[in-house]
Image: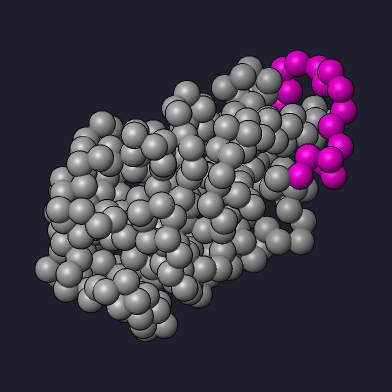
Amino acid sequence: MTVWYRDIAQLTIPTPFAVGDVHVYVIKGERMTLVDTGPKTNEAWEALESQLSAIGLVPERIDQVVLTHHHPDHAGLIERFPHAAVIGSKEGERFLVRDDEFIKDHDVFYKTFFSSMGLPESYFVLIEKMKEPLQALGNRGIDQAVSEGDILQGASKWKVIETPGHSQGHISLFRENDGLLIGGDMLLSNVSSNPLIEPPFSSGEPRPLPQLQYNESLKRLQDMPLSAVLPGHGPVVSDPSNLLSHRLKKQHERAMYVKQLIAQKESTAFEICMQLFPSVYRKQLGLTLSETMGQIDYLVSLGEIEIVDRRGDAFLYGALTNIKEPVNEQEIGR
């Protein structure tokens, strides 16, 4: 279904993922711009073609495709636009091209990461499963790399804002004259975006700290005159200021609950993950490990916890300060 928000067309594309439908956007300007594409499935392509037709367009009329980030639900159909320039951050290109070096680095990174969290080796077979969503991702490089403050060519009212956290290299588009942000998965109405643990941009670099990146991106948006956010999923965010504050508050409360668990017993990250997500961690290992490690990274940055020992290759975390007030997990919410 196509919906207009001000002068921007929002197209809703089905995905095979648990997140559900994804929104992509058309900006009509000197260059016809498509922001994100949907996943690499026939159903998604048919929906995209149909909704472009509903606003008087065919795929060949798209001059450029802007990718907010490299995840399969957003960047799957880029190969369907061979005539259009692909615009995005350089950090995401390794995921889009996926050469042999990337696959090798991907596996080495997650084996090291799993070991540091304390996962038994029996879980390492899931590294292959974690690559399955990449099958719904397009295979094409970036034609024009953009970064903070760049003006979108052919749509000169839109400026690139770097908003990393949910993914490495995540970008948003901001229109200053009316405060509108096309935000990808930066800020969603109904659920908090999960800052996902991903390999670094270059092999051998330190592991990114996506929760800290995401919090900084949230704070950055708090300082901007946002009127609304057009998201990658769910309803338009009509009150960004309140939602930004809510997301930061709830994340801090969640972290304090994790600290409470660690204060009760020194633990590996995987032990904490099993306590936080006892019924789903096996089915959604990547998501739950990212959520858990994000809270641990945040607590370490505040000086609330630290690495106190090692158990083989795994780090053991302990609390540095006392719990001021017990946190009830049921009251945290999202």
Q: Quadrant of residue 267?
A: top right
The magenta-colored residue range is 313-333
Residue 36 place in picture, x, y as percent: 34, 59
User: Residue sitting at 44 percent across and 55 percent down?
Assistant: 5
Q: Quadrant of the C terminus?
A: top right
Q: Is residue 284 left or right of residue 154?
A: right
Q: Is residue 268 left or right of residue 40?
A: right
Q: Residue furthest front?
A: 6
Total numbered labels placed on residues in the image: 0
Residue 86 visible in rendering? no
Residue 303 place in picture, x, y as percent: 63, 17
User: Residue sitting at 55 percent across and 68 percent down?
Assistant: 20
Q: Quadrant of residue 322?
A: top right
Residue 75 place in picture, x, y as percent: 34, 62
Residue 295 place in picture, x, y as percent: 63, 35
Q: Is residue 170 magenta?
A: no
Is residue 304 positioned above or below 104 on the image? above
Q: Is residue 332 magenta?
A: yes
Is residue 131 positioned above or below 202 on the image? below
227 and 143: which is toward the camera: 227
Is residue 103 positioned above or below 333 on the image? below
Residue 226 visible in rendering? yes
Q: Quadrant of residue 100?
A: bottom left
Is residue 25 positioned above or below 215 on the image? below
User: Residue sitting at 56 percent across and 64 percent down?
Assistant: 19
32 and 272: which is toward the camera: 32
52 and 115: which is toward the camera: 52
User: Residue sitting at 25 percent across and 57 percent down?
Assistant: 28
